[in-house]
Structure formats: structure tokens, C-alpha cells
């Protein structure tokens, strides 16, 4: 029996207390043993298969508030069930519905017998079963005359009979799992190397452009006009004149968790064109929040693009840093701009381009405030990740157009 069906069976019978965790395994009484991290056949609306550990923890704690459940699961370091999945998942596990679209059972077929491969545990095998009568040795160590209800031993395909009662223990997904292995340190090291590489390349481009401009005697020429902001271009005016300050341009993102784009997931969205929920990235990074990250437009291979700094603490910016701020992802709340060095949001969005990220099926009320501002609303799908790239490209196109206009004003 697969882990999802086994969990559903005990949930319906009200016997969840029979499930005991021993190290990295769940023992279902004396019937089944499954790894805690084994993926079940229930796929979340975000696209991933829930593990047995996640489903068992949820069904044991479904009665508490979702926010409290998320907090407890985070403390226990157990991946959580998302809010949209809660109700349909619980109805299935409790037997209120027989199935739903999120379930993807993969049942191997036996070509010889033409039916589903039977899942059977050791305890399910009984020599007294009518179909298995006589499948045992006699006192002389020889096989009995009747095998699987067939008289005699000739012309009996025992291999096929054995295969018919085999239970698959691994599939192509679980084979790739590495129990008791944590690759977080590998991810962190790779991320640091990539950021260091980008920093070096950015500095090399800067040095090269400076040298070229000196040779040509054109210090005031903007070589980056067709590719975005050039960090070597001399600022002629301060922020009052809308010129970009000297240094790498800055993009501000909210530090609040209720926004779609944060400092945790902005790099994947802008560089790779893929939206990853913040809570997923927080788990991957184990809460290691960076103060500043660097992003570049990677969609074009035939031209060099300029790096941007992304920050989420406006209060930490110095006066000269504000001259470098070119974009902001907004929450849709006035308090986000408290203590900003501007008169009002009208002045802010005249000098800084604003973006508001939302799910395309969210309530119109969520964008009611920002529709009064000079910001661009970017919509993405909750489930269709292949559409993220177009949204990211729209952000880049509008940002680069805005930076060019500011550089020439």
C-alpha cells in the first residue's frame, strides 16, 4: 500500500495514534514502514508532492489556526500544507471525498496478468489463501504438488506469480532522495561564489569603460545608454535634477512578508524569470536574510548588462545612497514610505519607478491604493510558473526605459 492510502485509512478509522515515528521512519502499527521524507501521491497547487511527514503533521494539527500551524511547523522544521490545499486535502484524508485532481497515483501494470500490480505486505501472505494453496514445502524440503491452485509443477510460471505480488519500494523520484543529507551549505557556497563572480565582472566592466572613456576623451559620454545604467557615467546633477547618483543603482523591496517580492526571492524572479514563494526561500536559506544582493538581467546573452543592488531597509540608506535609488516594489500601503526623503508619493514616483506585484486572480481591493499612484502593476499566476518570465521581462523593460530617461534628463 502506498503511504497516502495508508495514512487515509488510519485517519478514517480514527487510529492515527498507531502511527509512530522511529528515527527517520513512520511505523503504521505492525503493517507498514515508510520513510518520513517519502513523497506521497498528493500534489500541492504549487506543484510539489507533499511528503508523508508533512501530511501526517497536518492531519494531526488541522484543528488549529493556520497561522499557528505554520509557526509550529516552522519550529519543527516540517514543510507545511498551504492554505489553498488544506480543505480538499482534509476532506480526502477523512474519507469525505473519494478522490480529487491533486492525487496522482502511479500504479505499475503487470503485462502478463493484465491488472494492477498488487501491493502486499509480508503479513498479508498466507499459505491458506485459496489462490496460494500449497505454496510451501513439505516435510522433505520438496515443494507440494499443488502450486497456486494448479495441480502439478509443469507449465507453471512461478516468476510471474511472484512478480504479481511484489510491492514497489522505490520510484524514480525517491531514488534521488538522500536521507540524512543537508545540501544547504552547498547552496550557500554556490550562491556566494556566484555573487563574487558578478561583483568581479561588474568591477571589470567598470574599469574597462573608464579606461575607454579616458582614451577617447569622452568622459561625459554614456556608453550604457542602450543597455541600462552605466555605473561609470559621471553624475552631473543631484537628485533634484533626476540624475542618478554615482555608484551601482539601487532597487528597494519591502521587508514585510505579505508582499510577493522580497529580498529572499527577488534574485530568482529578476534573473531567472521564476517566482518562488518567500516562505520556500526562507526554508532553503534557513532564515539567513541578506542585507543586500546583486541582480543582473540574464535573459540576453549578446550584450553586457549592468548590475543592480537590491535592499529592503530604506532606513539604512545614507543621503547619497538615495540618489542611486531607481526602483521600488510597493506594498500598497502609505506607511511604507515613512521617513523617506520626499514630500509625498507623487514626488517619489516621479523620481523612482514603482512596481506592484500581485496574483492575477487576487481581489481588486488589493490594488485599490496603488491605482492612485504612478506605479506599474505586474500580475503573475499562482500556479503557471512558465508565465513568470514574461512578467520579469516587463519589469526589466520598464526599469531600463526609466533609467535611460533619468540619465538623459
Image (cartoon, rainbow, N blue to C red):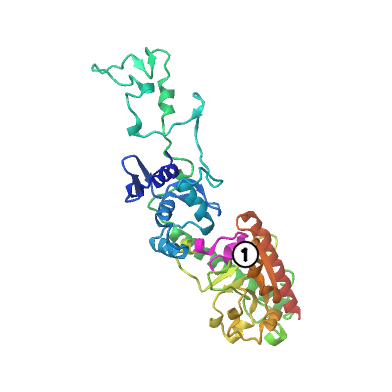
| Quarter of the figure with residue 406 | bottom right
Q: Is residue 374 above or below residue 8?
A: below
Name the spot of residue 305 as percent of width and height, x first.
67, 67
Q: Closer to the camera, 305 or 100?
A: 100
Name the spot of residue 226 as percent of width and height, x first.
74, 69
Q: Is residue 406 above or below residue 392?
A: below
In the rendered image, the quadrant that contains the N terminus is top left
| Quarter of the figure with residue 77 | bottom left
Does residue 290 appear anywhere in the picture?
Answer: yes
Q: Residue at 66%, 60% (x, y): give it.
A: 299
Left/right of residue 167 with respect to residue 228 in the rendered view: left
Q: Which residues are magenta?
A: 263-281
Q: Closer to the camera, 92 or 357?
A: 92
Name the spot of residue 110 as percent of width and height, x first.
49, 28
Q: Residue at 63%, 58% (x, y): give it.
A: 381
Q: Residue at 64%, 86% (x, y): give it.
A: 342
Name the spot of residue 231 as percent of width and height, x first.
65, 76
Q: Is residue 51 above or below residue 304?
A: above
Q: Residue at 67%, 78% (x, y): give it.
A: 352
- Give the total of numbered labels: 1
Q: Closer to the camera, 385 or 181?
A: 385
Q: Residue furthest left?
A: 139
Decide whether residue 276 is among the magenta residues.
yes
Q: Which residue is mark 1?
A: 270
| Quarter of the figure with residue 330 | bottom right
Left/right of residue 15 with respect to residue 247 in the rendered view: left
Amino acid at each position: 500500500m502506498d503511504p497516502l492510502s495508508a495514512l487515509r485509512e488510519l485517519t478514517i478509522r480514527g487510529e492515527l495514534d498507531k502511527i509512530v515515528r522511529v528515527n527517520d521512519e513512520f511505523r503504521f502499527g505492525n503493517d507498514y514502514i515508510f520513510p518520513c521524507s517519502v513523497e506521497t501521491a498528493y500534489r500541492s497547487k504549487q506543484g510539489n508532492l507533499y511528503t508523508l511527514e508533512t501530511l501526517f503533521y497536518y492531519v494531526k494539527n488541522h484543528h488549529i489556526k493556520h497561522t499557528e500551524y505554520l509557526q509550529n511547523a516552522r519550529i519543527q522544521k516540517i514543510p507545511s500544507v498551504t492554505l489553498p490545499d488544506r480543505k480538499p486535502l482534509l476532506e480526502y484524508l477523512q474519507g469525505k471525498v473519494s478522490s480529487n485532481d491533486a492525487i496522482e497515483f502511479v500504479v505499475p501494470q503487470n503485462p502478463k496478468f493484465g491488472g494492477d500490480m498488487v501491493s502486499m505486505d509480508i503479513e498479508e501472505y498466507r499459505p491458506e489463501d485459496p489462490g496460494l494453496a500449497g505454496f510451501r514445502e513439505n516435510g522433505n524440503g520438496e515443494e507440494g504438488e499443488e502450486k497456486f491452485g494448479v495441480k502439478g509443477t509443469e507449465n507453471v510460471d512461478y516468476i510471474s506469480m511472484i512478480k504479481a505480488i511484489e510491492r514497489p519500494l522505490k520510484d524514480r523520484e525517491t531514488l534521488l532522495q538522500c536521507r540524512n543529507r543537508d545540501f544547504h551549505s552547498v547552496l550557500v557556497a554556490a550562491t556566494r561564489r556566484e555573487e563574487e563572480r558578478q561583483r568581479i565582472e561588474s568591477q571589470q566592466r567598470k574599469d574597462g569603460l573608464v579606461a575607454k572613456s579616458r582614451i577617447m576623451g569622452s568622459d561625459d559620454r554614456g556608453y550604457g545608454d542602450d543597455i541600462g545604467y552605466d555605473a561609470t557615467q559621471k553624475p552631473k546633477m543631484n537628485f533634484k535634477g533626476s540624475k542618478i547618483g554615482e555608484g551601482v543603482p539601487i532597487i528597494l523591496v519591502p521587508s514585510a512578508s505579505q508582499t510577493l517580492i522580497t529580498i529572499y526571492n527577488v534574485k530568482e524572479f529578476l534573473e531567472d524569470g521564476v517566482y518562488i514563494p518567500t516562505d520556500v526561500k526562507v526554508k532553503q536559506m534557513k532564515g539567513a536574510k541578506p542585507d543586500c544582493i546583486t541582480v543582473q538581467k540574464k535573459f540576453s546573452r549578446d550584450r553586457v548588462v549592468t548590475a543592480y543592488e537590491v535592499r529592503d531597509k530604506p532606513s539604512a540608506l545614507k543621503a547619497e545612497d538615495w540618489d542611486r535609488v531607481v526602483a521600488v516594489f510597493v506594498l500598497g500601503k502609505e506607511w511604507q514610505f515613512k521617513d523617506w526623503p520626499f514630500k509625498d508619493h507623487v514626488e517619489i514616483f516621479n523620481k523612482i519607478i514603482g512596481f506592484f506585484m500581485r496574483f492575477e486572480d487576487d481581489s481588486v481591493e488589493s490594488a485599490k491604493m496603488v491605482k492612485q499612484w504612478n506605479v506599474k502593476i505586474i500580475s503573475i499566476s499562482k500556479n503557471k510558473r512558465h508565465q513568470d518570465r514574461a512578467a520579469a521581462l516587463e519589469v526589466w523593460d520598464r526599469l531600463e526605459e526609466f533609467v535611460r530617461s533619468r540619465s538623459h534628463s
